[in-house]
Image: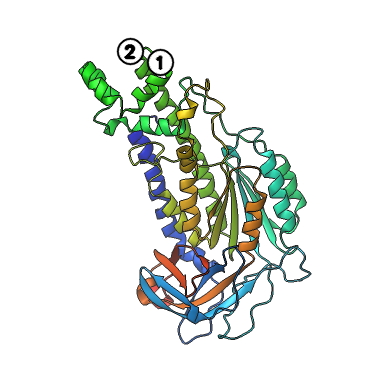
Amino acid sequence: MKSSAPASGAMFRLSAVALVLGLAGSAQLVLRAQQPPVFRSSVELIAVDVQVMDANGNPIGKLGPEAFDVSINGKRRRVVSAQFVKHANATSTSQTRRGDAAMLAPAPGDAPAASTARTVILAVDEGSFAPGDIQAVAEAARGFLKELGEDDMVGLYVYPTVTWIPPTTQRAVLAARLNNLVGEKEVLRSYYNLAPHEIVDITAQSTNPNSFLTVARAGDIRTREGAAALDPVLKIQARECPGQENDLDCASKIYAEGMTLATQLEREAQMSMGGIESLLRVLGEMPGRKAVVLVSGGLLVSDRLDGRPDAGTIARAMGQDAARANATIYTVHIDNAYPNPGLASKKGLGDMNFSRDRAMLGNWLEDFSRAAGGKRISVPVGGGEFAFDRVLKETSAYYLLGVEPSDVDRDGRPHELRVKVDRSDTTVRNRQWVVIPPTKQASR
């Protein structure tokens, strides 16, 4: 990755475009392989899976199709049926083997479906954890495996050095790989104690009319005094180089270090996104509904349009990819990575905005998880046992809706999907995108 801001942003944006184009080419084939059986109806319906929970994450049952409001690209679509599908828990003696839980939707008032096994993919971003910081996470993940139903099919995907164990009921091999997690994150070492949000601000200098770069070219001390309150480099210089406020050499070194560290942050973000992109391609080849539990130490993306790392609209594109793969994404975000242990000293740490750093580490994961029908659960302390428990609870059941689409929806392209429930005490989770292949007649 090049170190210049425009090239970096372009790389991320090109990646997003390539992802969307690649997905569009294979959408029809993948979806036909994954679609559940067609509902019994005079028209062909599509299956929309939705989770409906109370404030504690407990699934709510006994809702009929009249309780749901479904829209595609802002246009309301008729909900013909609603089936409540329950998954077996860890103590289940059910002999139901792996299969598509999306059975034919019953008429309103029919009994709910029997317990079924689920397919769960545990994905670990090993590159987002520093060596020594991942043991507690691995222990919590092993506990999560024990709590899943005995018939649940569980796979493991570890990246960026890819390990892929396809879904299986044999947990020992998964636990053994989790035991070997070591963490691959490179410490962000900064001589000038630069925090991630300061690096982001430094990379945005090209759009700052009061930048120290402008001051340096003008050579005007009065201009410099006016810029000091706004320019991140000059703020850092006041902290790191006391008594050298008029020395542009210090400011130049701070700027150079910021640009270098931005390249490191971009490389880490690219590796994490690349790992997720590869995982979604794998999931796209697997039939049936999948619940993905993504474990990450954070994926830092700029909160400024003119800053780096710039991920553009990749979260949206990957959310569409998750819809194609019939995957719901829950992210367990271990967000206790800062203050940064690589800082040269503790000088000025009290003034640093670490809450902004944590937000940047989680914002992209939040957007992606929501687009893929799940959520990001923040874990400020420990390995995330409570987060795994929450995922286990929320994914223990879902509704399978039979929805009547319009002809304009059947074009094999991503369309925005919204689902509401006519109850004020509920939380509704669904993927934000739906892709419906053309009918056989229209595709000829």
Q: SS class of the residue under badge 2?
A: loop
Q: Is residue 93 above or below residue 172?
A: below
Q: Which mark is residue 414?
A: none
Q: Which mark is residue 241?
A: 1
The alpha-carbon separation of the residues under discs 1 and 2 comes to 9 Å
Q: Quadrant of residue 4?
A: top left
Quarter of the image with the N terminus is top left
Q: SS class of the residue under badge 1?
A: loop
Callout 1–callout 2 Cβ contact below 8 Å: yes
Q: Identify the residue position indicated by label 2 in the image.
A: 247
The answer to whether residue 205 is left or right of residue 392 is left
Residue at the spot 49% in from the left edge and 23% down from the top edge: 190
Residue 413 at least partly seen: no
The answer to whether residue 29 is left or right of residue 11 is right
The answer to whether residue 397 is left or right of residue 13 is right
Q: Is residue 412 above or below residue 167?
A: below
Residue sitting nearer the eye, 194 or 72: 194
Residue at the spot 60% in from the left edge and 53% down from the top edge: 293
Residue 338 percent coordinates (x, y): 54, 34
Of the residues under marks 1 and 2, which one precedes in the sequence?
1
Residue at the spot 45% in from the left edge and 84% down from the top edge: 43
Label 2 sits on what residue type?
A: Asp
Residue 125 percent coordinates (x, y): 58, 43
Q: Is residue 235 above or below residue 182?
A: above
